[in-house]
Image (tube, rainbow, N blue to C red):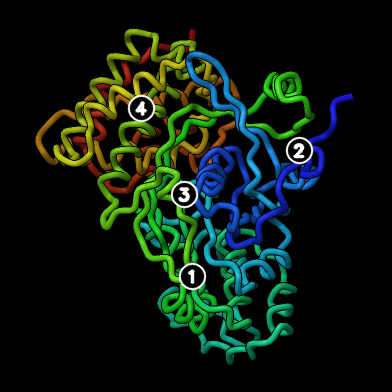
Amino acid sequence: MTAKLNRRTANAAPAAPVRIVHLGLGAFHRTHQAWYTQHASDGAQWGIAAFTGRRPDAAVALAAQDGLFTLIERGGEGDRFELVTSIVEAHDGADGAALCRLVAAPATALVTLTITEAAYNLAADGTLDTANPAVQADIGILRPAGTKDVSDAGTPPGPAAPRAASTPAASTAASRAPAVSTAAGRLVQALAARRDAGAGPLAVVSCDNLAHNGAAARAAIGGLADVANPGLGAWIAENVSFVGTSVDRITPRTTEAEIALVAAECGYADSSPVVTEPFSDWVLSGEFPAGRPDWASAGAVFVDEIEHFENRKLWLLNGAHSLLAYAGQLRGHATVAQALADPACAAWIKEFWDEAEANLPADGLGIPAYRAALLARFSNARIAHHLAQIAMDGSSKLRMRAVPVLTAELSAGRSGAGVARMIAAWVAFLREGHKSGATVSDSAAAELNAALELPDGQDLRALLGILDGGLAADDAAIAAVAAQMDGLPAPA
C-alpha cells in the first residue's frame, strides 16, 4: 500500500516557523508564492500558515499531509516533480480565531492574498462597495460596541472605541468576535488583534490579477476599517504597508490523473498535487516593515514602479485568456491550446495584442519577447488550461483586462476592434448561456441575469454598464462592441 504523504513518510525537514499568513489557499498560491518561498535562499526560516477561501476542503486535505504537496512542472518534454514543504499550517478560512492568533503573533511579518478579483468587493471607481450586503454586514460586526450605526454615507462614522490594552486577553477577545463573511473583514478583525497585541507593523501583499492590486487591497481592507472603526483604520494606515505585485504562472485544475501520476512516480499518496508550467514570474513593489524572504534569490524582481508590468500581464496574458475563454468556447474549444490552434482565434489574439501593446511603453518591458513566450506557453497542450475555468467572474476580470484598452483605443481615435471583440465574445457567451439555462459563474450573476432579460441592444448597454458605467454611456463604445457581435459564431 502506498504510504500517505506527510513530513515523516517524506523524511522532510522540521516545519519552518510561521512568519507568513496567506488568505486564499488554492492551486495558484501553491505553485507561485509557496514555490518562491521554498526556493528563497532563506526559505527554511519562513513557514506559511495558509487559510482557504469559501470552502475548507483544501485545508482539510493539506493538514492531513502536514502542509506538504507535490508540484508537477509540466513542460513540452515531460514532467518534473518537486515536494514543496513551505506551507506548515493549513486552516479553514472560517476559523477566525486561528487567523487572529497568527496575524497577531510578533513573528508574523507579512500577509499574502490570492482571494480572486471579486473578493475585494470594490465598486467600479476602485473604492470599497459599501452597498454590497456582505460588506454592510461586516461593517455592523466590526463596528465597536456603543458606536453610532451609520447607514447614510454622508454621515460621519461614530467615535472609535478606546484602544484595548495590548494584552493576550485583548487579542483573544478580538479572535472571538462574531464571524465576518468577506476576506477583507476577516483581515480587519485579525489586524485589530495584532494592534491590541502590540505586535507592530507588517506588510499585506496582494497576488491577485488586479490592476493596482496593492491599492485595491488598501481600499478593501483599510476602507472597511475606516468605515467600521476609524481608530483601527488610522492604525492600519500607519502600520500596514500594501505591496503591489504582478504574478504569472499558468496553473490549471488538478485532476485524478495527476493524483495517480504522483503515486506512480513518487511512491507516496498525495491527495493535493498541483500542476503548472515551467515559466514563472513575480514583480513586487512596496515596503516590508517586518522583513520578507529573499524571494529575489528565487527569481522575483523588485521595482519602484509596477503599473506597466501589471498592465503588460493583465492585458497581454490575462486579456488573451479571456478572449480565448469566450470566443474559444463559442467555437467549440475546451482548452487554451485548442483555441489558439484555431486560426481565427489566433488572428484575434494578435489583433488584440497589437492594440494593447500600442498603449504600453515601448521600452523596458520586452514586449516582443513576452508575446513570443506567451504563444509558446499557450501552445503547451500538456497543460490542460480549461476555458470554462478562465471564463468565471468575467464581469470583474474584463473590467481590468479589456475596459482600459478599449477606452484608450477610442480616445486615440482608433477602432479598438480587437478588444471590442473580447467584450462582444463575453456578451455572446452570456446570451447563449442564458438561452440554454446555464448557471452564470460570476459574482455579479444577479445583475447579469437581469440585464440578459432585456431585449437585444438594451441588454448590451446594461451588460457594459456592469463592466463600467462610462462604457454604457459612451455610444462609440457601444457601437464598437456591437460591430463585433456578428462575426462571432454560435456554439458548435
Q: Nearer the viewer, mark 3 or mark 4?
A: 3
Q: Out of 381 and 399, give the one closest to the viewer.
A: 381
Assess disc 3: are there few (<14), some (14-19) or many (≥20) residues with their C-alpha within 10 Å of its C-alpha: many
Q: Percent x, y for residue 335?
A: 50, 17
Assess disc 1: are there few (<14), some (14-19) or many (≥20) residues with their C-alpha within 10 Å of its C-alpha: some
Q: Earlier in the sequence, mark 3 or mark 2?
A: 2
Question: Is 139 displayed left or right of 235 in the figure?
Answer: right
Distance (Cα) linking label 2 and label 4: 40 Å
Q: Earlier in the sequence, mark 2 or mark 4?
A: 2
* Outermost residue toward the left in this view: 413
Q: On the image, numbered disc 4 is attached to which residue?
A: 320
Q: Earlier in the sequence, mark 3 or mark 1?
A: 3
Q: On the image, numbered disc 2 is attached to which residue?
A: 10
Q: Secondary structure at mark 1?
A: loop
Q: Percent x, y for residue 126?
A: 37, 57
Q: Secondary structure at mark 3?
A: loop
